Amino acid sequence: MKVVHNFNAGPCVLSKEVIDASIEALKDFAGTGMPVICVSHRSKEWQAIMDETEALWKELMNIPDGYKVLFLGGGASLQFMMVAMNFLNKKGAYLKTGVWAKKALKEAEGIAKQYGGEAVCVASSEDTTFNYIPKGYTIPADADYFHITTNNTIYGTEIREDFDCPIPLIADMSSDIMSRPVDVSKYTMIYGGAQKNVGPAGVTFVIVKEDALGKFERYIPTMLDYRTHVEGSSMFNTPPVFSIYVMYETLKWVKRMGGVAAIEKINIEKSDMLYNEIDRNSMFVGTVKNKEDRSRMNHCWVMAPGHEDLEAEFMDYAKKCGMVGIKGHRSVGGFRASLYNACTLDDVKALVKCMQDFEAAHK
Ligand SMILES: *Cc1c(COP(=O)(O)O)cnc(C)c1O
């Protein structure tokens, strides 16, 4: 099989151990003689996977009592609407740090228009293509919640501090979940698509504080009401079984790696290695304005002034070296390497070497 270094932004690399175990489960799931996608989701074998998956989340993320972990369909994008549907009574406050944050705000505006209330943007970095995290803003004390996107996948910025928020804090952690230990108690809800750090596409995780639900009267369609899924333990209807199964294997892998704190250490090493090269290499320059805002997951850079004409050439060269998925998002251009949990130190070393060799060939 072709050897590649997969830096895709999502769906993205998963550990080979996870893939192999999932293939096994597709052949014979838990000794049932059936593929995992062919057993009843009401069977005791499947129930055990649901229970263990939630238990692994609680253990790995150190989730306090009073929170439920849900596994839903619809992607993080459906959560943009569900958050507003379930929590926006009078006012939803949003930090606009990128395209995903903007989409979340748009859904809240729609819900507010339909049911009353308003959605407000507290601060934005859109003026400079979201290349920094706004600071020094005031969170409105009268809002129902404050929504943030902790990692801005397209622009390579990240909020890594679990700050004290005077109102319920809701975070889209699609692209940095389980990359570092999180103080879950500071959040009312954390959600994200699994396909960046905790599995394949098709399942969305929601960590929600149970007593924060149902605070005001509104008819919420059954499938959009978090309480439905809390009561049904994510099995109100047929859950996305295979995606959950691969997530289960991914969490077991995280545990074998030593847990989230151990993963964070490796993530720091990988990320520092790449940023050091971006900063050192005369051919390239990073796109994030302040170093403290730099994401450890998504690393964005462009050709340095004077070398812009070599962009296509570097891309070709990187491809030849086995690099996959390093083209920057069309709204930013240049390059982006996503160093999610399953991306290895060796992958990053190969990318750094490729950047160094390219520089040497053009000096
Ligand atoms: C990828 C991504 C999304 C969209 O997730 P879907 O599951 O495709 O809807 C939302 N937010 C962030 C931060 C992302 O990185």
Image: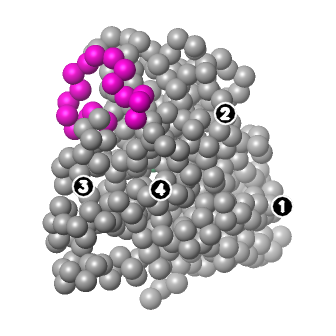
Query: Residue 58 or 198: which is nearer the viewer?
Result: 58
Mark pair 2, 3: CA separation: 33 Å
Q: Which residue is mark 4?
A: 57
Secondary element type, mark 3: loop
Looking at the picture, which amino acid does disc 3 mark? Pro
Residue 114: where, in percent of width, then height?
A: 27, 16
Q: How is the image coloured?
A: one colour
The magenta stretch spans residue 211: yes
Residue in the foreground of this view, choosing between 183 and 72: 183
Disc on res. 239:
3
Foreground tag (2 vs 1): 2
> Which of disc 1 and disc 3 is earlier in sequence?
3
Residue stretch in magenta? 210-226
Name the residue rendered at 63%, 52% in the picture: 181
Q: Name the residue type under label 4.
A: Trp
Q: Which residue is mark 2?
A: 163
Please name whichever residue, 326 or 201, is drawn nearer the observer in this view of the structure.
201
| Distance of label 3 from label 4 (alpha carbons) | 17 Å
Q: Amino acid at mark 1?
A: Arg
> Total label count?
4
Q: Residue at x 66, y 49 (%)?
A: 295
Residue linked to disc 1:
280
* Residue, far front: 65
Q: Nearer the viewer, mark 3 or mark 4?
A: 4
Split into 4 quadrants, where in the image is the N terminus?
Answer: bottom left
Position of 133 relative to 200 (above/below): above
Residue 357 visible here: yes
What's the CA distance linking mark 2 and mark 4? 21 Å
